[in-house]
Image (cartoon, grey):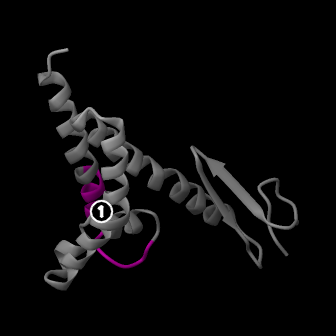
Amino acid sequence: MRYTAEGGVAGGASFAFTGCECTILITANVNASEVGDVVWTCVLWPTVFAVIAMGIGSLLRSNGAAVAISLFFAFAAAPLLGLVSAASETLGNLMLLPALARVTGDNHGAPIAAAAAAVVGWVALFWCAGAVRITRDEY
């Protein structure tokens, strides 16, 4: 049995938000809390990386370089920052990917409030750097 967004039984459930498509196949009944978790995850992850990419683009003032660096950050640098947990588990839990995972439902890691503050801090770091560049630049 598979649950659909319309509330019936069908081949699968698909939720699409802001360019992120999350497809879930569930073999049992699903409740509103589980659907809410999926929606929250599908909205938050791309939003966080979009705002980081916007900050990088504003900082560099080059769309091509911003795309390249944003992809590098998302697929290489952020996972490598997860290795910080080898030195300090507490600090490692505050890196972007573990903190974002905790905010979106992972049961391991920093307390949710600390993880949320870490995610906001990571986003603010890039966004504020871009904002400073724009306000100090003469057009």
* Residue 19 appears left or right of 55: right
> Looking at the image, which residue sits at the far front?
64
The answer to if 10 sits in the magenta stretch is no
Residue 36, image x, y percentages: 60, 58
Q: Residue 31 sits in which quadrant?
A: bottom right
Q: Which residue is mark 1?
A: 96
The answer to if 113 sits in the magenta stretch is yes
Vertical placement of 117 versus 84: above or below? Answer: above
The three-letter amino acid code for the residue at tag 1 is: Leu
- Magenta stretch: dominant SS? helix
Write down the region rendered in magenta: 106-120
* Residue 67 appears left or right of 43: left
Residue at x 19%, y 85% (from the top left corner)? 86
Residue 101, image x, y percentages: 40, 68
Residue at x 30%, y 62% (from the top left corner)? 96
Residue 35, image x, y percentages: 65, 61
